[in-house]
């Protein structure tokens, strides 16, 4: 059994053969591991306290943590604040007691609510506008695809003259990709217009940080939106044709080209209809009212003016007795009785008669306010080329009729052509073998590259360093003694 002294000498000899550069690299690695282990073992793990804070919010939180003596770490350029896990609950409670972190929206509304009584109306209006802008920006940032948003409101002062009252306006700047910006532009304008009284969606400009106007669509932007609409209509029609022809001919046995005629004219129609056949109803109602009596007395009792006026008849008719009155027919009118009373020398009493006629014209009327869609498909043109070999017993006329019946547009034009398709070349066996062997070939190439790196660079470099470490400096040759000549 070898002695421990011999083992130690052997280890020293082998250690002496290792180059100094290798010892230095190993020492650096060991020191780094020691630092990492000391940092991990010095305290508990750090957990996230707050994430996604703005620089202003993060600065306030860090200042308060320093006052409270709670250690912290920063990550993600200061947006993520970490604290030790045992101090997480205490840190949140103590920061919450100081109302931190407070978002910009809550801070601005709190500033408006806590404004002193000496604040001017202009200052209060400005603070209210800033708070509303922050609230709208926060709502817009919550939409799908919107990364950030800034809202600017131009709210004019109210004037006592309605005719001179200027209209409010707004601008929104968003950070989003082109697809999300185009899809959310109208929704953002409607949101801002609904939050400001008197603001119409057409007076809201929505732009991206790259300078692209997404609402209102004008010029090139509107043309792009129309192109997308036409493309969507054509793609939907092509998909419908493919679903119709695939069971009949099979996939790959037809080619389709669709061209849609889309009308983007916007119309608003107001219709008034008078009855099913324009009939007009007419109703008439009359009413006769009579007050007083023939024998009613008028005037002041006991006065001479209360006497009836004298009779003005030219000749005094003979007095008719009651039997004569009784012999009158049952159909005698009130005027006949008055004549009898006048013939008897009795004056007629006062009476009042009124007549009213009410005519009502009733019209069967209905009103409708119709707003047509932003676009309508006026017609569509379809060209289809069929594989003659896959057509079978079906004819081009049958295919044409089937395609035309699939669309309910005002104008549908279909052109069907049967032709022979060029057969696609069948994949060769060698191509399939090469494709299946591609992963193995790649692995072999990587292995060869690793071997070349190892034997061509790493091992020669290690041998060179070993030779340099084992090289022993040779002593300098002794100087030659020159013969001395005696004088």
Image (tube, helix red, strand yellow):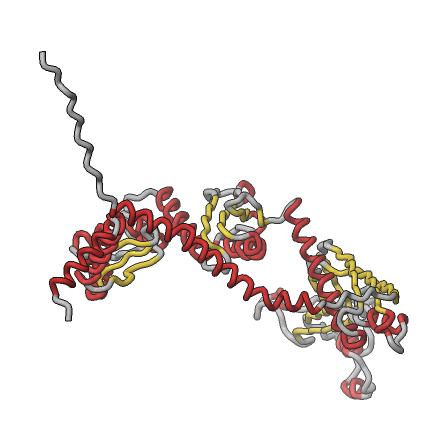
Q: Is residue 233 left or right of residue 117?
A: right
Front position in the image: 31 or 485: 485
Front position in the image: 248 or 364: 248
Query: Residue furthest toward the front?
Result: 486
Q: Where residue 207 sits in the image (x, y, percent)? A: 54, 47
Q: Is residue 344 visible?
A: no
Q: Write the residue at 68% across / 66% down.
A: 430
Q: Write the residue at 34% across / 53% down.
A: 76
Q: Where residue 246 sits in the image (x, y, percent)? A: 76, 73
Q: Where residue 474 sits in the image (x, y, percent)? A: 21, 39
Q: Is residue 329 left or right of residue 6?
A: right
Q: Is residue 145 left or right of residue 314?
A: left
Quarter of the rendering containing residue 187: bottom right
Q: Is residue 265 visible?
A: yes
Q: How many marks?
A: 0
Q: Write the residue at 27% across / 51% down.
A: 22
Indicate the quadrant containing the C terminus: top left, top right, bottom left or bottom right: top left
Q: Is residue 203 left or right of residue 263?
A: left
Q: Write the residue at 64% across / 68% down.
A: 433
Quarter of the rendering containing residue 10: bottom left
Front position in the image: 456 or 22: 456
Q: Where residue 173 sits in the image (x, y, percent)? A: 49, 47
Task: Tell me if residue 203 comes above or below residue 343 in the rendering.
Answer: above
Indicate the quadrant containing the N terminus: top left, top right, bottom left or bottom right: bottom left
Query: Residue furthest toward the top?
Result: 487
Front position in the image: 228 or 286: 228
């Amino acid at each position: 059994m070898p002695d421990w002294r011999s083992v130690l000498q052997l280890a020293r000899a082998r250690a002496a053969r290792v180059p100094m550069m290798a010892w230095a690299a190993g020492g650096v690695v060991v020191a780094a591991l020691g630092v990492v282990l000391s940092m991990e073992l010095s305290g508990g793990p750090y957990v996230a306290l707050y994430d996604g804070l703005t620089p202003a919010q993060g600065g306030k939180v860090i200042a308060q943590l320093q006052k409270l003596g709670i250690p912290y770490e920063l990550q993600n350029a200061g947006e993520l604040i970490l604290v030790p896990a045992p101090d997480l609950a205490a840190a949140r409670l103590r920061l919450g007691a100081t109302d931190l972190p407070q978002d910009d929206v809550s801070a601005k509304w709190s500033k408006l609510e806590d404004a002193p009584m000496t604040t001017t109306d202009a200052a209060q209006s400005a603070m209210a506008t800033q708070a509303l802008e922050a609230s709208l920006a926060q709502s817009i940032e919550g939409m799908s695809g919107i990364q950030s948003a800034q809202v600017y409101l131009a709210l004019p002062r109210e004037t006592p003259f309605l005719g001179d009252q200027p209209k409010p306006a707004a601008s929104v700047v968003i950070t989003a990709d082109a697809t999300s910006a185009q899809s959310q532009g109208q929704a953002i304008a409607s949101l801002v217009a609904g939050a400001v009284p008197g603001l119409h969606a057409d007076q809201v400009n929505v732009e991206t940080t790259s300078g692209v106007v997404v609402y209102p669509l004008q010029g090139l932007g509107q043309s792009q939106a129309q192109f997308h609409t036409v493309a969507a209509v054509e793609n939907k029609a092509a998909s419908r044709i493919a679903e119709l022809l695939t069971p009949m001919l099979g996939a790959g046995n037809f080619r389709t080209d669709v061209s849609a005629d889309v009308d983007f004219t916007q119309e608003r129609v107001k219709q008034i209809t008078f009855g099913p056949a324009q009939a007009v109803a007419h109703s008439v109602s009359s009413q006769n009212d009579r007050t007083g009596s023939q024998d009613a007395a008028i005037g002041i009792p006991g006065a001479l003016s209360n006497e009836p006026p004298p009779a003005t008849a030219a000749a005094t008719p003979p007095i008719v007795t009651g039997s004569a009155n009784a012999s009158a027919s049952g159909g005698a009118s009130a005027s006949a009785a008055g004549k009898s009373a006048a013939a008897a020398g009795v004056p007629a009493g006062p009476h009042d008669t009124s007549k009213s006629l009410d005519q009502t014209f009733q019209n069967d009327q209905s009103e409708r306010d119709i707003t047509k869609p932003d676009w309508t498909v006026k017609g569509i043109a379809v060209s289809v080329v069929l594989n003659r070999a896959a057509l079978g017993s079906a004819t081009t006329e049958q295919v044409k009729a089937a395609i035309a019946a699939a669309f309910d547009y005002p104008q549908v034009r279909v052109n069907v052509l049967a032709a022979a398709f060029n057969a696609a070349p069948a994949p060769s066996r060698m191509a399939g073998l090469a494709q299946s062997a591609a992963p193995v070939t790649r692995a072999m190439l990587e292995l060869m590259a690793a071997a070349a790196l190892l034997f061509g660079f790493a091992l020669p470099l290690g041998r060179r360093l070993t030779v340099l470490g084992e090289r022993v400096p040779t002593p300098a040759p002794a100087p030659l003694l020159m013969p001395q000549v005696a004088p």
